[in-house]
Amino acid sequence: MITISQDDFIAFLIREKALRFGNFTLKSGGTSPFFINLGDICSGEALQFVGQVFAGKIKNDFGFVDILFGPPYKGISLVSATAIAWQQIFKKPIYTCYNRKETKTHGEAGMFVGKLPQKGDRIIVVDDVLTTGGTKIDAIKMIESTFDVTISGIIVTVDRRAKGVDLGLGDYPFSSIVSLPNIIGYLERQGDPNAKTINDFYEGTYEG
């Protein structure tokens, strides 16, 4: 099983340009001094690495699970990479599932692709980042109401919440590979001036 420090993972995100610094407008309309786009992790080598890191983190934080659910669109490639790494590392079966944003009306039809959850399955939602938790709650409600199951947890690459922002996930177990304090600490140790602006964002004092 791959063992990697949080600093190494942050350096990987920067190297792959999945973590960028500047002045960005967020979906909420607010501004941010950084942007995280896991869609920029698109080479076979990079996806293999992310899958290995996710597999190790999921096993450590949640134990053995049955299904990895990836919300579209970035979650789809993440669960695929993780499932392959899981099989290679733990030699145990694990399945993937994701939903379409529009219901397909031809061929196999339906909203879901992959292994459909059943009662008793341990299901983990895997996604790129968490800002407010809204997207994850929507996914959880959809899965639980459709299949009458209970989600076992949520994991993302980066917890990018500002300080004091509630997860919005209730009692669902949550994990991330890195968080904003991890990124700030890494940049401080590198002498990178972006550390201060991201810390301002984290503390709620950033003025873009």
Image: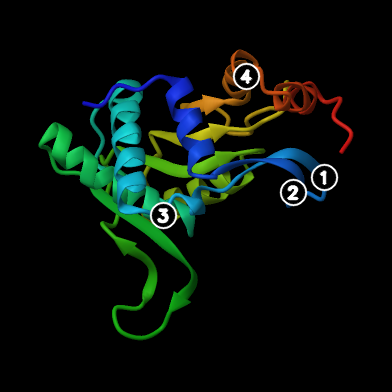
Task: Point out residue 203 in the picture as x, y percentages from the top left corner.
Answer: 79, 21
Residue 175, placed above or below residue 108: above
Q: Residue at x 38, y 34 (%)?
A: 152
Reading the image, the residue beneath label 3 is 42
Tell which residue pokes out farthest to the bottom in this image: 106
The residue wearing badge 2 is 26
Q: Amino acid at mark 3?
A: Cys
Q: Amino acid at mark 1?
A: Gly
Q: Say few, some or many: other residues with alpha carbon within 10 Å of mark 3 (under 14 / 14 to 19 / 20 or more).
A: few
Measuring from the top left, give residue 182's x and y in whole percent: 57, 19
Q: Residue at x 54, y 33 (%)?
A: 158
Mark number, residue 136: none
For marks 4 and 2 on the same chain, the one whose residue lies earlier in the sequence: 2
* Circle 2/circle 1 CB separation < 8 Å: yes
- Which residue corresponds to mark 4? 181
Q: Quadrant of the N terminus?
A: top left
Q: Of callouts 3 and 2, which one flags the residue occurring earlier in the amino acid sequence?
A: 2
